[in-house]
Image (cartoon, rainbow, N blue to C red):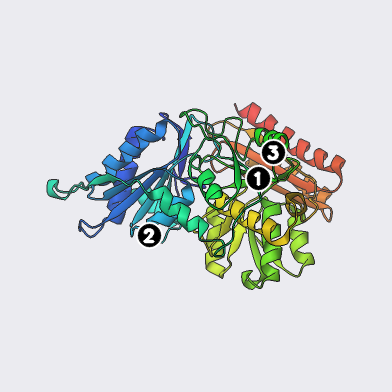
Amino acid sequence: MARKFFGTDGVRGTANQYPMTADMALKIGAAAGRYFRNDGSNGHRVVIGKDTRLSGYMFENALTAGLTSTGMNVLMLGPIPTPGVGLLTTSMRADLGIMISASHNPAQDNGIKFFGPDGFKLSDEAEAEIEALLETDIQPAQATNIGRAKHVHDGRFRYAERLKGTLPAGKRLDGLKVVIDCANGAGHRVAPEVLWELGATVIPVGTSPDGFNINNNCGSTSTRTAAETIVSHGADVGICLDGDADRVMILDENGQVADGDQIMGLFASSWADADRLHKGTLVATVMSNLGLERFMTDRGLQLMRTNVGDRYVVEAMRANGFNLGGEQSGHIVMTDYATTGDGLLAGLQFLSAMIETGQPASALCKVFDTVPQMLKNVRYGAGQAPLDAPSVKAAIAAAEADLTGKGRLLIRKSGTEPLIRVMAECEDDGLLAQVVDGIVAEVEAVASVSA
């Protein structure tokens, strides 16, 4: 069944513009409530978390109204990282978890992500069934069966205790000076608290949210401020989270960035050495660098690739019994500890590796040489299908022929925006630019003609 509203990670868009309106959030809440409260009992519950966007209040209230109208009981967690919602969905015995966030997007955007009772994100099939309910007259609960709503004030503390428990008993971070950039987002309180409680000297960045500054010149997509702070304070390492704290970039003592590929490579190698990497396999997406694949192969390990989106990484992990995966963008999924990507958890595991090895962050941040990679995006209009144009198909075929034995090419439509993403990898910088720019020019030409 096709999905109209749900993208690669829930529903997302500009707040107060369709489909991210209060009216639609109310309907989505009612549809989700009807989907999960399907036996008429009053014991069903849902937990709702959010990041720090101003529109989060509006969507929290609208979703709560929709859910309670169908008899679901709502537990509101307030600002909390996305992985905290996954954790508390299971620990609070809820039928459903909802995170209100647009992740790394700017403040004017927002989104709604769903977790099932097992703490994992809902499947495409479940989301499609919820969408189907939106097209129907959703039956409200009887007046005596309307759900209740209450605030839960200790959610972030429960999450913090779980995070600290992922380190061996007695292990501390004494002696480490850590810059933590929370992107003025969902992790702005819990992340510095956890690091301080474990003994680190904490230098916080991006911990003053005002409803509008989430991801604004800070966080995992804008690491310059954190890098400058590391150098000026002589810090040992930096941890940069995104707006909902489910992904991370690690910065070494010189302010140099290690993306998700490097972090996954480090963890996969060390876990394999400790006989912890299930079936010797790491799961990543088609966007991960070819250098990571070569690194894994050289060590007798395997790299499985999936479609873009951490939910697809997790689905592959669960289906095959793997315990480590993620994305180049910084989603690091460790199912031994969590049900989804967790930026702070990955940061703690990196700090643990620093303590165990005695090596500086710079020695751990680059475990393989990357293959030069170029990514360009082309925006297209509503109703257009530029990838179907003969000229674009011909350009792609020519590029694939040029890259045979030298690199790889990936063309895909964004799951959240009207963009064609053109990515290639090749050791030859000139050839790399030639194939990417050639395809981009053809896509732009088609999009312009069709405009």
**Which of pointers 2 and 3 indicates the residue nearer the eye?**
3
In this rendering, is residue 451 above or below 135? above
* Quadrant of image for the C terminus: top right
**Which of pointers 1 and 3 indicates the residue nearer the eye?**
1
Q: Secondary structure at mark 1?
A: strand
Q: Position of residue 378 (x, y in %)?
A: 65, 34
In this rendering, is residue 168 above or below 176? below
Q: Residue at x 43, y 58 (%)?
A: 119
Q: Nearer the viewer, residue 18 or 290?
A: 290
Task: Decide if residue 155 is on the left or right side of residue 297.
Answer: left
Q: Which residue carries the number 1 mark?
A: 177
In this rendering, is residue 436 above or below 449? below
Task: Decide if residue 33 is on the left or right side of residue 99.
Answer: left
| Residue 3 in sight | yes
Residue 230's tag is: 3
- Which amino acid type is shown beneath numbered disc 1? Lys
- The CA span between labels 2 and 1 is 33 Å
Q: Quadrant of residue 135?
A: top left
**Which of pointers 2 and 1 indicates the residue nearer the eye?**
1
Q: Which residue carries the number 2 mark?
A: 91
Q: Position of residue 121 (x, y in %)?
A: 46, 55
- The CA span between labels 1 and 3 is 9 Å
Q: Position of residue 64 (x, y in %)?
A: 29, 42
Q: Residue at x 35, y 54 (%)?
A: 96
The disc, 2 or 1, on the residue closer to the chain's N-terminal end is 2
Whether pointer 2 and pointer 1 mark residues with C-beta atoms closer than 8 Å, the reply is no
Task: Decide if residue 236 is on the left or right side of residue 131.
Answer: right
Q: Secondary structure at mark 2?
A: helix
- The CA span between labels 2 and 3 is 37 Å
Q: Residues within 10 Å of mark 1 (few under 14, many from 20)?
A: many
The disc, 1 or 3, on the residue closer to the chain's N-terminal end is 1
- Which amino acid type is shown beneath numbered disc 2? Ser
